[in-house]
Image: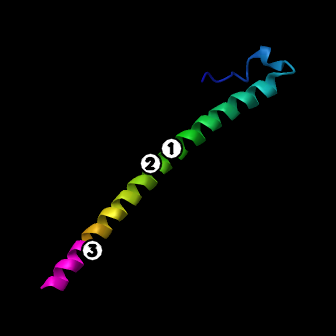
Amino acid sequence: MKKKNLDDPNYCKPNALAEVFESSLQDAKVLVHNRTCEIRNLYNQYKNMAEELKMKWRFTLENIQQQ
């Protein structure tokens, strides 16, 4: 998203602060969404790895008990 130039003389409009705030808010929403997706993906990877480890451990225990 294009950043607003706060040094621009046209930025002395009454709505300038609201526009800057809205722009920053939209940037923050995108950032939060992206980070949330990253965290969700990492959590799913963790769950899959944990499940794989449980299955390997179960298999190892069964082999030990059979010996």
Q: Position of residue 30 (x, y in %)?
A: 59, 35
Residue 66 located left or right of residue 58: left
- From the image, which quarter does the C terminus lie in? bottom left
- Disc 1 is placed on an element classified as helix
The reply to whether the magenta stretch includes residue 35 is no
**With respect to residue 59, does 35 lie above or below?**
above
Task: Tell me the residue that label 2 is attached to.
Answer: 41
15 displayed left or right of 43: right
Q: Residues within 10 Å of mark 3 (few under 14, many from 20)?
A: few
Residue position marked by numbered label 3 in the rendering: 58
Tell me how the rendering is colored.
Answer: rainbow
Quarter occupied by residue 52: bottom left
**Vertical comparison of 38 with 14: above or below:** below
Magenta region, residue range: 59-67
How far apart, in angstroms, are the residues tagged by discs 1 and 3? 32 Å
Q: Mark 2 and 1 residues: CB-CB less than 8 Å, in contact?
A: yes
Q: Amino acid at mark 2?
A: Asn
Residue that badge 1 annotates: 37
Query: Residues at badges 1 and 3 in contact (C-beta under 8 Å)?
Result: no
